[in-house]
Image (cartoon, rainbow, N blue to C red):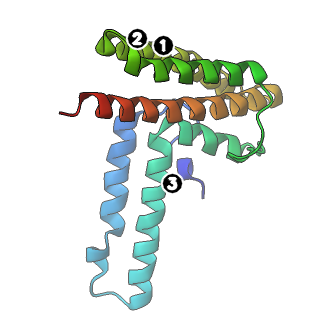
Amino acid sequence: MNYFQLFGIEVTFDVDLNQLSQTYQTLQKAVHPDRFAHASSQDQLLAVQKSAEINDAYQTLKQPLKRAEYILTLRGVDLPNEQQSFGDTAFLMQQMELREMLDEVKFADDVDAALNHVQQVFRQEYQQLFDLMRDNIVENNTAANVLACDNLRKLKFYQKLNIEVERLEDSLFDD
């Protein structure tokens, strides 16, 4: 059973997170190990396994990039691993420029303003890519799925950049 079936929802990128959370709570209550305290050890083990599966499904479906990756996997799209080389040299050059922009924040006259500018640029570019990926997934044809996969990989670069932004912010503003 796939994660969407487990939660009784349509395989779609846009999910109702409130409904997802409510269904998660209902499913977890049904298989909570305490309910099987007096059951056989096999039933207890099955409850623990089912609870873990429900948790994995929930974590995947509630996070947009994990959900996108899961949908693409269900469609049979071959997702490249993180270490596989990236063919879009323009994107890679842009990533280098963004990293340079991030490095320059430390030396700005107004560090707070520079950091806010970097965060705004990252958010805008991330959102543009995210919207493209979402549109590709909704389109759901071979070419669109390949583009969605490519955009998903690019979005993961931005996730890493955002972690670096948070680290920089912590280091700059820790007293």
Closer to us: 78 or 110: 110
Disc marking residue 117: 2
CA separation in Å, label 1 and label 3? 38 Å
Q: Name the residue under label 3.
A: 6
User: In the image, what residue occupies the spot 47% across and 33% down?
Assistant: 15
Quadrant containing the N terminus in the rendered view: bottom right
Name which residue type carries label 3: Leu
Asked if residue 4 is positioned above or below residue 19 in the image, the reply reads below
The mark found on residue 54 in the picture is: none
The answer to whether 172 appears left or right of 47 in the picture is left
Q: Nearer the viewer, residue 96 or 144?
A: 96
Residue 10 appearing in the image: no
- Residue in the picture at 67% in, 27% down: 151
Q: Which residue is drawn at 44% across and 65% down?
A: 52
Mark 2 Cα-neighbour bin, 10 Å: few <14, some 14–19, many ≥20: some
Q: What element carries label 3?
A: helix
